[in-house]
Image: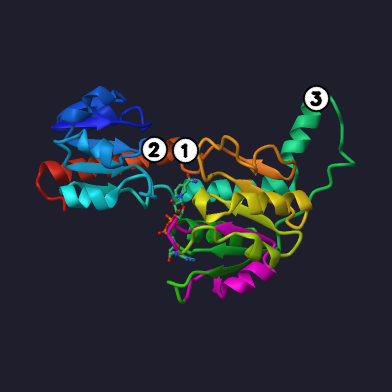
């Protein structure tokens, strides 16, 4: 069995997989002979890509969203597609907490001015997240980890998710209430026809003017131009964005604004998470080799 690791995984993964066959890393000339393909979000197996890999039996997406893979075509060709959804929740939830605290305490401004030799102790008055309302749109694995941490910080947590009726921590409510009454709105939904452009001119107009919008889900759930217009007009206070309609976000209206915290899709990028993903990948490849995977 030939295993092609197309994107960045943990450094020890090739050694762990060696017992199942030949492992090649980031050498796409090997695609035509590959039985197993490991991708994260960079490689995008579309129809043409899949057609150039006639031996392919399994694609593993190390991470959650499989929107970079043409899963319908894989099904047609009998190629199994698996992901590792349970691995990344803690890493992404910790990024969300970091985003809220960084914005409230003005850490980026404070670092830049102090590092430039200034002492802006009086000017850099911040705010707390304690007793603020956090609205979670989607309450799956990641949002639940965010809720656990936000509760420990004393936040009030509400959530909208049409597929979840009750939750241990978040009070479930309507999308309208989440939009109208949250101080922070954090998106934790998949990209689907239903969630495309969920944050747009109309939904933005319902929010409080001091709201902070956090997106660690998928870029296409926000209309970037509408959000950029609202940030520039000050009808939305701040945004923290880790994911973009196009990545890298060349030409995105969100890049370069004053009231935004931008990161390059690093939500899942922790060493610990890569280790967890590696363990799940090893398990899936082992199951394939024993004919146990479906
Ligand atoms: P999950 O499947 O556990 O949870 C998603 C939730 O969204 C579910 O509870 C579902 O019912 C809900 N949902 C679906 N449609 C909805 C709608 N129209 N309105 C409201 N809720 C809706 O997924 P997860 O593991 O929590 O991941 C959430 C998102 O985070 C995904 O888009 C995933 O791709 C993304 N993600 C990003 C990173 C990153 O690096 N930034 C890493 C991992 C995952």
Question: Mark 3 near mark 2, Cβ–Cβ under 8 Å?
Answer: no
For residue 204, side relative to residue 187 (left or right): right
Give, as a single range, the part of the protein colored magenta: 166-193
* Residue labelled with disc 1: 269
Image point (63%, 73%), residue name: 177
Q: Residues within 10 Å of mark 3 (few under 14, many from 20)?
A: few
Q: Establish whether ligand 1 lies closer than 8 Å to the Cβ of label 1.
A: yes
- Does residue 163 appear in the picture of this structure? yes
Residue 28 x %, y %: 28, 26
| 3D distance between C-alphas at marks 3 and 1 | 29 Å
Among the two numbered marks 3 and 1 on one chain, the one whose residue lies closer to the N terminus: 3
For residue 116, side relative to residue 245 (left or right): right
Q: Quadrant of ligand 1?
A: bottom left
Vertical order, 270 against 85 (above or below): above
* Residue labelled with disc 2: 274
| 3D distance between C-alphas at marks 1 and 2 | 7 Å
SS state under label 1: loop
As rendered, which of 273 and 9 lies closer to the eye?
A: 9
* Residue labelled with disc 3: 116
- Does residue 155 appear in the picture of this structure? no
Among the two numbered marks 1 and 2 on one chain, the one whose residue lies closer to the N terminus: 1
Image point (34%, 42%), residue name: 62
Residue 38 x %, y %: 28, 37
Scheme of image coloration: rainbow
As rendered, which of 175 and 267 lies closer to the eye?
A: 175
Question: Mark 1 near mark 2, Cβ–Cβ under 8 Å?
Answer: yes
Inspect the magenta stretch and tell me whether residue 218 lies in it: no
Vertical order, 262 against 159 (above or below): above
SS state under label 3: loop
SS state under label 2: helix
Among the two numbered marks 3 and 2 on one chain, the one whose residue lies closer to the N terminus: 3
């Amino acid at each position: 069995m030939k295993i092609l690791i197309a994107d960045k995984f943990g450094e020890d993964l090739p050694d762990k997989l060696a017992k199942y066959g030949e492992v090649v890393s980031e050498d796409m000339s090997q695609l035509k002979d590959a039985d197993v393909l490991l991708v994260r979000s960079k490689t995008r197996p579309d129809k043409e890509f899949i057609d150039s890999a006639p031996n392919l039996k399994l694609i593993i997406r190390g991470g959650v969203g499989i929107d970079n893979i043409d899963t319908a075509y894989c099904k047609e060709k009998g190629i199994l597609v698996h992901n590792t959804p349970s691995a990344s929740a803690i890493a992404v939830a910790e990024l969300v907490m970091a985003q809220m605290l960084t914005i409230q305490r003005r850490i980026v401004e404070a670092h830049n001015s102090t590092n430039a030799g200034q002492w802006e102790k009086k000017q850099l008055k911040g705010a707390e997240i304690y007793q603020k309302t956090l609205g979670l749109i989607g309450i799956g694995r990641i949002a639940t980890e965010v809720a656990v941490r936000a509760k420990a910080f004393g936040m009030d947590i509400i959530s909208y998710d049409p597929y979840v009726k009750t939750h241990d921590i978040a009070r479930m409510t309507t999308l309208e209430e989440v939009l109208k009454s949250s101080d922070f709105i954090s998106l934790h939904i998949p990209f689907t026809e239903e969630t495309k452009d969920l944050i747009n001119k109309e939904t933005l107009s319902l929010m409080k003017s001091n709201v902070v919008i956090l997106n660690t889900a998928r870029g296409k759930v926000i209309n970037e131009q509408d959000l950029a217009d609202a940030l520039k007009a000050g009808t939305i206070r701040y945004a923290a964005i880790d994911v973009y309609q196009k990545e890298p976000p060349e030409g995105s209206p969100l890049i370069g604004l004053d009231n935004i915290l931008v990161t390059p899709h690093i939500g899942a990028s922790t060493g610990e998470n890569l280790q967890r993903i590696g363990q799940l990948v090893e398990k899936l490849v082992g199951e394939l080799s024993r004919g146990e995977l479906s």
